[in-house]
Amino acid sequence: MMAKTGHFLDSFFMAKTVAVVGATNNPFKMNYKLVSNLANLGFKGKIYPVNPREKMILGMNAFKRLRDIPDKIDLVISAIPAEKTMGIVEECSLLDIKQLVIVTGGFSEGGDKGKRLHKQLNDFVKEKGIRVLGPNTLSPVNSANNLIISFNPVTKIIQGGLSFAYQSGFYDLRLGWLCSHYGIAKMIDMGNKMDINEVDALEYLGQDPETKVIAMHMESLRGDGRNFFNLLKRISFRKPTIILKSGRTPGGSHAAASHTGVLSGENDIIFDSMLRQTAAVRAQNLDDFFDLSKAFGFFQLPGGNRLSIITLSGGEGVMATDACETSGLKLAKIGDKTSHKLEEILPLWEIPLNPFDAGVCMEFHLTDIRKVFDSLVYLPEDENVDFTIMQMPPPMLMAKKRELSEEVIIALRQQYVQMFLNLKEVGKPFALWRTSVDKEEDICAEMLELRGVPVFETAERAIKALSHLYQYRQKIMSHHHC
């Protein structure tokens, strides 16, 4: 049962009947995926394809016009050329349909003709009380009912507490990856923000009980700035809120205006100083944005800032230690009790317990790698450790893949993943970073993230993201004491 908030965006995310105008049977056309994703993922409502030239689309009855559909439509997805869109909007008004997504571009960013179309459309929807997402947008996405509006194939959605709000088409290109590597609650692309903007999105996600973490990427502030920052201040102390603001430089601002038709004229220094009055976490770039989203989406806040590092090589350990100290974290001092428990896997000489070189230990136990992994769990269990990161051993460490059957490979992958799940089950934040960056590691990384173990590209990126968890915890604790 989906929890309603009473906000007008409920009607978009929880639509029970969706009409797709511009639906097609042709798998080589972009619009094909608008219906096939809904069908393949098992959207929990009814889908009504609209196309005057088709009788059936993907096994579903197709309708010539919206008015031919024998059902009350909650949400219309319009994916037809800009100059024909006004006709669909007028039909929505006649049928008393109040929720519309305009996928098509070519309005405010489409020269003088596009600007005229934009104004005509905008005046009409305001007068008729129709709420519009877009133009130039793909969304909404709701993992609770498998509602997904996208041009790209999405084969699965991991349900979780992370919600994205953005205004850029490149998220659609990454949608399959985001849905299979992050625990998603909702996603909203505001497009050119003719009507629905970042204030509406933030207000809604702040109220939504399924959203535990908000990740928002903005190029411009279209809504009321004061309202936005007051909302952000209130929400960010309750829910971690990650903000990526692009268009920070004059050149970037001009580039944002050219493809959204909105002049992004805010002063970045003012934006940043306002952000500091909230508990929002500012991402510096796209990698940072995704890393922070992953860390906050996967983890509870840590008890402190003491980090345990498990590596496969001394060199990686040195770099991870540097990153730890420059990020405001501390190397955990591993206790004597843990030291004693680890003795059975240690080499003949003394090695540091943090960072802990598991690679050396594995060299001494090549016939029983499992024994090393079983013992590694003592590190996150140590009372002086708040979180642990580990370098991923190459997945097929114990065998040559080409000599094995598919069944054995699948079983080995599952064993491999289970070894890390044991460290996660200690209950403190536990993350991995990549080593070989090959196809086999990709497969195992996806399996791990499906089971709640995040995988980062490097130790430095993992540590930086984890340090923000601690900083956020400190910020909300000091706020509560005020």
Image (spheres, helix red, strand yellow):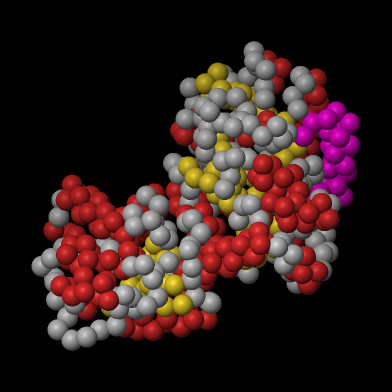
Residue at image point 20% right, 50% down: 411
Horizontal and vertical percent for residue 81? Answer: 72, 38
* Left or right placement of residue 173 versus residue 448 in this view: right
* Tally of numbered discs: 0
Furthest residue toward left:
367
* Range covered by the magenta-colored residues: 105-131
Furthest residue toward front:
481
Q: Magenta region, mostly helix, strand or loop?
A: helix
* Left or right placement of residue 356 versus residue 192 in this view: left
Residue at image point 85% right, 39% down: 122
Asked if the stretch drawn in magenta spans residue 110, the answer is yes
Horizontal and vertical percent for residue 454? Answer: 42, 58
Q: Is residue 253 visible?
A: no
Horizontal and vertical percent for residue 103? Answer: 68, 40
* Left or right placement of residue 232 versus residue 420 in this view: right
**Rendered image quadrant of residue 402:** bottom left
